[in-house]
Image (tube, rainbow, N blue to C red):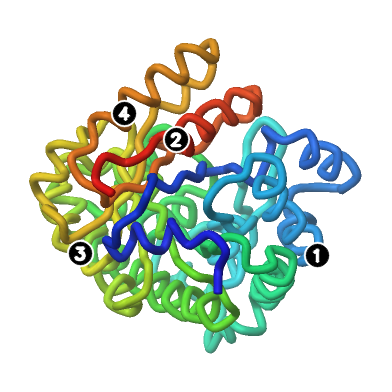
Amino acid sequence: MLENDLYLKAHRGEQIPRFPVWVMRQAGRILPEYRALRAKLKGFKELVETPHLAAEVTVQPIDRLDVDAAILFSDILVVPDAMGLKYEMVEQIGPFFTETIRSTQDLKKLDQGMDVKDRLSYVFETIRITQLELRNRVPLIGFAGAPWTIFCYMVEGKGSKTFSEAKKMIYSDPVLAHELLNRITEFTIAYMKEQQNSGVDALQLFDSWAGILGKEQYAEFAIPYVKKIAESFLNFPFTVFSKGAYASMPQLATLPCTALGLDWNMEFDDIRDLVGETKTLQGNLDPCLLYADKKTIEKETKKLLESFKSSRHIVNLGHGVYPDVDFEHVQVFINTVKNYETKFA
């Protein structure tokens, strides 16, 4: 039994004395413990692929920040990497793929008959070690990138403001686009199933580049694949976070997931009207607010909490915490949430 299961209760819509809180990218650069560990290693991928170190980083924010959930320290790009499209983290550039998928012929670059359990064994070992180190204190969240977001990297080969190569494909060769999206989807389902089997308590799907598609394009090239993944985890705590996809929220609201993540441009009232009490909403404080002074952070956090019209909320930022934010400011945000008694109890 978990000592603190507020996060899971919120997913189920159960009565809670206060709102659970955690922070996207909490396992990372804001913590001095992480920076000290990272300085000893050759690169980011070494940390991701070394289970006992990745587990240590996953648990750090539980020890330091006392959040209500841990999120697995990993990377959404382990999926294309395991599919045969290798990437590296390059200084000043970020993720970089030496090979991309731009044609039907390029699909041959992807390995056939991939054994997810073998290819990503280091992730599943990280989960097992992490659960031992968490000692049933809080739930552990596993995750993956949504097919559209992974598609963007596999086609573009690196990060981009526009992902114009990825968008070019959906217009110039939609058949190829769907073939690649299908392959990513099938692999992602197998990957998340194995995370579930390894012991995570919940899952989250990150569609970080949802906002670069229009409503019609998102309906064709993203939502069907997200839906297929969500349908594979019915009756399991599952969050879909489609950053920037405000116009697509009516469709996202019908997905068979237990929670929807909202970015800071999305209005809670609008989304609550769409989902009623059928889903939990997660988010959505502007990450940049954490650059403000502590009194302002506390004030704005309370303002967010007061705006809730339902108990079905998990408090978070509208995206990941930025690496140069003072972790003490993150602590103010977390403490403010934890000291606020929900009016719905």
**In the image: residue 43, left or right of residue 74:** right
Q: Is residue 109 visible?
A: no
Callout 1 secondary element: helix
Q: Are marks 4 and 3 in contact (CB under 8 Å)?
A: no
Query: Nearer the N terminus, badge 4 or badge 3?
Result: 3
Callout 3 secondary element: loop
Query: Nearer the N terminus, badge 2 or badge 1?
Result: 1
Viewer-nearest of discs 2 and 1: 2
The percent position of residue 167, horizontal first and vertical second, equals: 30, 47
Which one is in front, 315 or 217? 315
Q: Residues within 10 Å of mark 3 (few under 14, many from 20)?
A: many
Which amino acid, by three-letter code, is at mark 1?
A: His
CA gap between label 1 and label 4 equals 37 Å
Viewer-nearest of discs 1 and 4: 4
The residue that label 2 is drawn on is 337
Which amino acid, by three-letter code, is at mark 3?
A: Leu
CA gap between label 3 and label 1 equals 35 Å
Q: Are marks 2 and 1 in contact (CB under 8 Å)?
A: no
Query: Nearer the N terminus, badge 3 or badge 1?
Result: 1
Query: Nearer the N terminus, badge 3 or badge 2?
Result: 3
CA gap between label 2 and label 1 equals 31 Å
**In the image: residue 255, left or right of residue 116:** left
Q: Is residue 298 visible?
A: yes
Which amino acid, by three-letter code, is at mark 2?
A: Val
Viewer-nearest of discs 3 and 2: 2
CA gap between label 4 and label 3 equals 25 Å
